[in-house]
C-alpha cells in the first residue's frame, strides 16, 4: 500500500476542484467525482495537464445506481479508498425561510444530506480496507446552531438559506455519529467549514479564494493517526456545532 487514493465529490469546479488539486499536488491519486461527464472530464484533464495524478469518475450523489456503480468501479480499479471528501452540495434558497417550498427543502436535503449518506455508505467497505481512512464532510458556518442562534454570530449571509443551513446541521450530526461508530476502525470523520468562498454557489460574492477554502478540508483529509475525529473545523480551529 504505497499510493494514497482519494475521492472528492463535486470536483469539477469550485472548492472541490481545488481540494483535488491540493491533494494531488501532494502525490495523492485523486478520483475527481462529477455528475456531468463533459465537465468532469474537462476538469480532470486540466489538472492532468499540470502533471497531477487525477482521474475522473462519474458520480451524481442523488442517484443510487450511479453511486453503486462508482463504488464498484473503485473496488475494481483500486481495491480500497483512503480519503473521501463529501464536497458536492447545492444552495438554492437565497430567500427567507417563509418563502421556502417543500420541494426546494427536499431537493436540498436530497443532495446535501442523503447524497452524503449514500456516498459514505457505498464507499465505507472500501474505506475500511484502508489503514488510515479519512472522511471529510463539507459543512458550513450556516449549519451551526450556536452561531445561527446568536444574532451577533458573525454569519456572512443574513436571514435566508433555511434549507441549506438545516441540511448542513443534519450533515454535522452525520459526522458525529459516523465518527463515533468508526473510531475503533481507525477512520476519522470530521466536518470542514471553508469560510465564505467565492464560487458559483454564491455568484462569487464570497470573500475567500478557493485556495483558502480548500485548506481546512485538505488538512482534515491528511490528519495523522493521532488526529481528532468527530469535530467541525475551520482555519481558526474547532467551530461550535
Ligand atoms: P460550487 O462551485 O457550486 O460547486 C458545487 C459542486 O457540487 C459542483 O461540482 C457541482 O456540480 C456539484 N454537485 C451539485 N450537485 C451534485 C450532485 N447531485 N452530484 C454530484 N455533484 C453535484 O460550490 P462550492 O462553493 O465549491 O461548494 C463546495 C462545498 O462547499 C459545498 O458542499 C458547499 O455547501 C460548501 N461550502 C461552500 C461555501 C462557499 O462560501 N462557497 C461555504 C461553506 C460551505 P455541477 O457543476 O454539475 O453543478
Image: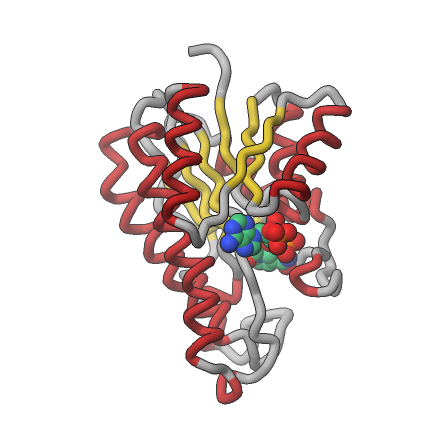
Left or right: residue 161 versus residue 124 is right
Q: Position of residue 176 (x, y in %)?
A: 32, 51
Report if residue 77 is visible in the image: yes
- Quadrant hosting residue 170: bottom left
Decide: is 97 above or below 67.
Answer: below
Q: Quadrant of the C terminus?
A: bottom left
Decide: is 51 above or below 115.
Answer: above
Count of marks, rendered view: 0
Q: Name the residue rendered at 61%, 41% in the picture.
A: 37
In the current view of this chain or complex, which residue is farthest to the top? Answer: 2
**Observer-nearest residue: 134 or 48?**
48
Q: Name the residue rendered at 36%, 22% in the picture.
A: 130
- Quadrant hosting residue 74: top left
Ligand 1 appears in which quadrant? bottom right
Q: Position of residue 79 (x, y in %)?
A: 38, 20
Q: Position of residue 160 (x, y in %)?
A: 56, 79
Q: Name the residue rendered at 49%, 88% in the picture.
A: 98
Amino acid at each position: 500500500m504505497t499510493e494514497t487514493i482519494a475521492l472528492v465529490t463535486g470536483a469539477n469546479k469550485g472548492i472541490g476542484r481545488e481540494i483535488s488539486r491540493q491533494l494531488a499536488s501532494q502525490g495523492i491519486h485523486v478520483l475527481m467525482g462529477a455528475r456531468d461527464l463533459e465537465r468532469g472530464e474537462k476538469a480532470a484533464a486540466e489538472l492532468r495537464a499540470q502533471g497531477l495524478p487525477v482521474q475522473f469518475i462519474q458520480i451524481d450523489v442523488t442517484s443510487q445506481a450511479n453511486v453503486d456503480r462508482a463504488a464498484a468501479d473503485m473496488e475494481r480499479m483500486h481495491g480500497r479508498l483512503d480519503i473521501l471528501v463529501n464536497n458536492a452540495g447545492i444552495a438554492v434558497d437565497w430567500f427567507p425561510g417563509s418563502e421556502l417550498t417543500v420541494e426546494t427543502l427536499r431537493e436540498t436535503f436530497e443532495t446535501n444530506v442523503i447524497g452524503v449518506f449514500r456516498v459514505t455508505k457505498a464507499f465505507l467497505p472500501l474505506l475500511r480496507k484502508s489503514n488510515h481512512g479519512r472522511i471529510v464532510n463539507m459543512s458550513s458556518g450556516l449549519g451551526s446552531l450556536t452561531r445561527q442562534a446568536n444574532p451577533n454570530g458573525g454569519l456572512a449571509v443574513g436571514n435566508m438559506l433555511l434549507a441549506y443551513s438545516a441540511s448542513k446541521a443534519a450533515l454535522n450530526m452525520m459526522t458525529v455519529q459516523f465518527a463515533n461508530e468508526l473510531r475503533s476502525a481507525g477512520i476519522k470523520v470530521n466536518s470542514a467549514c471553508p469560510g465564505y468562498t467565492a464560487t458559483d454557489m454564491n455568484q462569487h460574492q464570497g470573500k475567500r479564494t478557493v485556495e483558502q477554502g480548500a485548506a481546512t478540508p485538505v488538512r482534515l483529509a491528511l490528519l495523522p493517526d493521532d488526529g481528532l475525529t468527530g469535530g467541525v473545523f475551520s482555519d481558526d480551529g474547532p467551530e461550535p456545532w
